[in-house]
């Protein structure tokens, strides 16, 4: 039985959060399957990578440390992964649903004829019986994600081909240290054996990194507004409440599409996944594509004029009323009762 592999994205010597989240999930899957968790790091100046990934339970770290592998370009990384997977035959391979993972995953999967499920929201191990042949499969990767516009949650299996490949967006899985003392083995890849000139036809001449000013992922309190907020001007009420509480403002896609708020604040399936201590949903109905991005919040307060809004099922406290009346009262009472 072969391993669970995680492709680690690296930026300036640091492993990306999405990769650490996948290592956390990968560790749980590998333990369930009784196999090793293996990580792959490709880039340049990767001296400290093992210190970053071993605490997440990595048993084997494959390192390709070479100037030709940094910054990421499609062909060399694809070649390295295809050849490594061909030799090691992992049963599961995971990568982030980032611009890198979305570029790399399908190419690797196509070269290996393995299949891939993009943007999974959950990964589990289970069994499957083929309805036609009656053949029973055990220990398959359940690749779970919303499908058909979010109307169903599909569980996708890949019984025959390996590796079973999946991408997962940042923030969807939890990042958790497995054991600070955990030690794995480092295996160095001889890049010369993998690459030839045809893999190096693309040269990156210049890179420009745009850093987002908003970091809703890290905010402990999020005041999120939906289409029910009504206008960009009304969103100022939410900014005021967020400022008073020391939080950030988030939004539903309907609010973003209506121009009430910037896209970088969108929460949900096609936005950011958040897990704040407190999530205040204002004028948000609670469609599955939105709740997929906030359902793991520790506490949810829903403010909605509709007493039967689906968001109320996720809420610890429901305030049935007009947000234009409720939010100013919240600001007023919070200011009055806190020093
Ligand atoms: P609505 O559904 O219109 O709800 C507005 C709510 O405001 C209602 O419940 C209403 O009762 C309440 N309301 C109205 N006036 C007031 C008031 N004065 N005071 C209090 N309450 C009031 N959506 C996301 O949010 N994030 C995503 O990432 C996302 N991705 C998607 C991906 C796909 C492929 C698809 C098909 C859809 C996606 N959506 C996403 C859209 C999603 O299906 C919903 O359309 C969207 O979440 C609805 O936003 P909303 O709740 O703000 O608006």
Image (cartoon, helix red, strand yellow):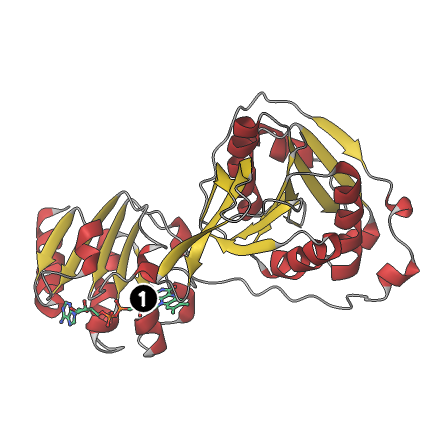
Q: Residue at x 77, y 66 (%)?
A: 204
> Can residue 128 be seen in the rendering of this structure?
yes
Is the residue 244 above or below the residue 190 in the image? below
Tell which of 237 and 300 is nearer to you: 300
Q: Residue at x 27, y 42 (%)?
A: 298
Q: Residue 253: give x, y in percent of width and height.
A: 35, 69
Q: Residue 77: give x, y in percent of width and height.
A: 75, 53
Q: Secondary structure at mark 1?
A: loop
Q: Residue 37: give x, y in percent of width and height.
A: 62, 32
Q: Residue at x 66, y 61 (%)?
A: 103
Q: Residue at x 30, y 46 (%)?
A: 297
> Can residue 241 be seen in the rendering of this structure?
no
Tell which of 122 and 297 is nearer to you: 122
- Residue denoted by label 1: 252
Mark 1 crowd level (few <14, some 14–19, many ≥20, 10 Å Cα): many
Residue 261 placement, left or right of 93: left
Residue 323 placement, left or right of 100: left
Is the residue 138 above or below the residue 329 in the image? above
Cβ of mark 1 under 8 A from ligand 1? yes
Q: Quadrant of residue 88?
A: top right
Q: Residue 276: give x, y in percent of width and height.
A: 32, 47
């Amino acid at each position: 039985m072969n391993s669970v592999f995680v492709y680690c994205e690296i930026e300036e010597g640091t492993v990306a959060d999405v990769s650490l989240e996948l290592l956390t999930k990968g560790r749980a899957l590998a333990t369930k399957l009784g196999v090793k968790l293996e990580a792959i790091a490709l880039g340049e100046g990767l001296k400290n990578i093992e210190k970053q990934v071993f605490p997440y339970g990595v048993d084997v770290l494959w390192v390709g440390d070479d100037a030709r592998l940094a910054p990421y370009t499609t062909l060399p990384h694809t070649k390295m992964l295809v050849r490594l997977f061909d030799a090691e035959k992992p049963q599961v391979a995971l990568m982030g649903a980032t611009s890198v993972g979305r570029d790399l995953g399908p190419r690797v999967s196509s070269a290996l004829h393995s299949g891939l499920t993009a943007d999974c929201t959950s990964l589990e191990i289970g069994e499957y019986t083929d309805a036609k042949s009656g053949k029973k499969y055990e220990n398959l990767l359940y690749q779970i994600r919303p499908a058909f516009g979010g109307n169903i949650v599909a569980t996708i299996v890949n019984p025959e081909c390996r590796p079973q490949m999946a991408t997962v967006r940042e923030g969807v899985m939890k990042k958790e240290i497995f054991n600070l003392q955990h030690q794995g083995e480092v295996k160095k890849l001889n890049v010369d054996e993998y690459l030839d000139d045809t893999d190096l036809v693309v040269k990156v001449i210049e890179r420009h990194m745009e850093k987002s000013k908003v970091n809703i992922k890290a905010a402990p309190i999020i005041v999120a507004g939906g289409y029910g907020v009504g206008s960009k001007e009304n969103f100022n009420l939410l900014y005021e409440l967020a400022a008073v509480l020391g939080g950030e403002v988030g939004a539903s896609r309907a609010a973003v599409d209506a121009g009430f708020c910037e896209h970088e604040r969108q929460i949900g399936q096609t936005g950011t996944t958040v897990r704040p201590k407190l999530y205040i949903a204002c004028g948000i109905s609670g469609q599955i594509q939105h709740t997929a991005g906030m359902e793991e919040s520790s506490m949810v307060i829903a403010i909605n004029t509709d007493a039967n809004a689906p968001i109320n099922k996720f809420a610890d406290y429901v305030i049935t009323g007009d947000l234009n009346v409720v939010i100013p009262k919240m600001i007023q009472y919070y200011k009055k009762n806190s020093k």
